[in-house]
Image (cartoon, rainbow, N blue to C red):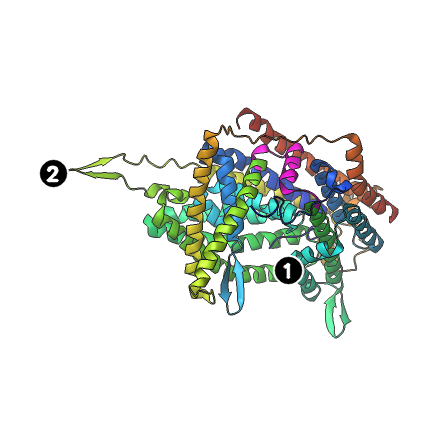
Amino acid sequence: MHVPDGFFNAVTSVSAGAVAAAGVAVCLRGARRELDDRTAPMAGLVAAFIFAVQMLNFPVAAGTSGHLLGGALAAILVGPYTGVLCMAVVLLVQAVFFADGGLTALGVNITIMGLVTVLVGWAVFRLVTGLARGKGGVTLAAFLAALISVPASALVFTLLFWIGGTAPIEVGAVAAAMGGVHLLIGIGEGVITAVTVGAVLAVRPDLVYGARGLAKPLLLRGAEGTTTTVGEPEPVPVRGALKPFLLGGLGLTAVLAGVVSFFASSDPDGLEAVAENKGFLDQAADHLFGGWALADYGEVGGIPVGVAGIIGVGLVLLIAGGVAYAARSRDKIKV
Amino acid sequence: MGAGHHHQLYLPGGSVVHRLPPQCKLLAIFAFAIVVVATPRERFWAFAAYAVLLGVVAAAARVPVTYVGRRMVIEVPFVLFAFLIPVIGLGERITVLGLSLSVPGLWAAWNILAKATLGVAASILLAATTEPRVILIGAQRLRLPSLLVQIAMFMLRYMDVIMEEMRRMRVARESRGFEARNFRHIPVIARSAGALFIRSYERGERVHLAMLSRGYSGRMPIIQDMSASAHQWATALALPAAALAVLGLTW
């Protein structure tokens, strides 16, 4: 699923990059609450684990095999914030060192494979564990979380490709096909995630972030048959609570929708080719933003195409830079 | 520890490209990728010129073409997808070799093939001429959040350890006659993944304690001087500047 360069137009790539940067900035702060001073070493270790697990091929149907995305697994094992960070780092390393996924598509990749899988997976997990308690509940929740996170990621990819992709496609048909195929892959992902979580739960239940509420109090049996309970587990401090996480996700989506659709409407590559179906070089400048100076990448307002593109890119870069700077200044206060 | 200490993706050398500071190379490759993606797909000559530019960089870095070619395999899944687009695409259709193909779809496929190939080749050149650890130091100098860089550094350090652990578990499975053939074998693999997580996490905790006892304070010391001179910046940024010039010339 790693998206290479050239799949999305420059503006979509950079907007998705801004969304990814904002998401990662939020998670950098959240992860410190999940792991304290151990954040860097342990998150690095989990990232390496996710990288290794992504190489585990499992048979899906006769002859074909799939591999894990790992977003839901990471969220359940180490918590949503650390999970996003781990996925982001895995994708970064894959793009820079292994050329797997384009450099300019890094933002898209982090958004669809990091943010969406972890966000959706964690939301479903919390929802199901709220309804079904106990170890069985956790296993079931892990299965459903992973199962739903994969097609959700595929659907967001389709949506992004429809908005800012470089090919004209029929969005409904492709969404159905992508969703269907990835539902199948999701079943494999769900089974493997549930069994993995179950295996860890059986040996070291304290390592599963999503099952912290299950720890039993220590029972002391005296020689005369007296029993005393020690260390009643404090009501689980639900760090990484659902609400701020969902609100953050909602905000990100709003930014993405706003920025991307705004620019994409002036993009000669994808949408107009579908809408006008008249060939792709003689663009008719009669749409909503037709009068705006940057419309059709500036062919109307007399600004050369490249300059208009660069202005757009620069605008989004400014936003991304602002977010990165905000995250960095907090870095310095407490590392 | 018998092998060298460089990573398998890194091709040791002392060329101009190898000696450039990592932050210059990162920025240059990133700017180059943006210029490539922003190039309108109708400008065939521009893409040919970009390929020549990368060829010049490869020659200057003394990276053999076969080395780059071998590692381009990573692109294959998306090449297959690119070939699918003309078949499922919308719009005006033409018949080629008895297949009805969409014209905008063909353009899109060409667009993805050209840009993805250039992007992959550029990334491979970066990884081949710069050690992974050094690339991350460069990223930190480019103001990537330091926590993120640290996580990536720990990931690189742990990666080989965990892969080796996984390999040992696979050898153990296979020497007992196990081979994942169908759906029912998934639980076995999943339990190995669970065991792998516990083993690596416990190892990570031990390593963390060992680091603390040796004075780790949340920051890895950087012992190399990574500052870049104006001349080095100019050398590195020649690549995206040339690409931008090509884009301007083929207007």
Amino acid type, label 2: Glu
Q: Chain of mark 2?
A: A
**For residue A286, side relative to residue A247 (left or right):** right
Q: Which mark is residue A224?
A: 2
**For residue A231, side relative to residue A112 (left or right):** left
Q: Report the residue marked by disc 1.
A: B77
**Residue B209 locus on image (x, y percent):** 44, 34
- What's the magenta region? B129-148
Q: Quadrant of residue A306?
A: top right
Q: Is residue B138 located in the magenta-colored stretch of the structure? A: yes
Q: Which mark is residue B197?
A: none
A14 over A335 or under it: above or below: below
Q: Nearer the viewer, residue A168 or A61?
A: A61
**Which of the two discs, 1 and 2, sits closer to the camera?**
2
Q: Main secondary structure of the magenta part?
A: helix
The residue positioned 50% from the left and 48% from the top of the image is B162
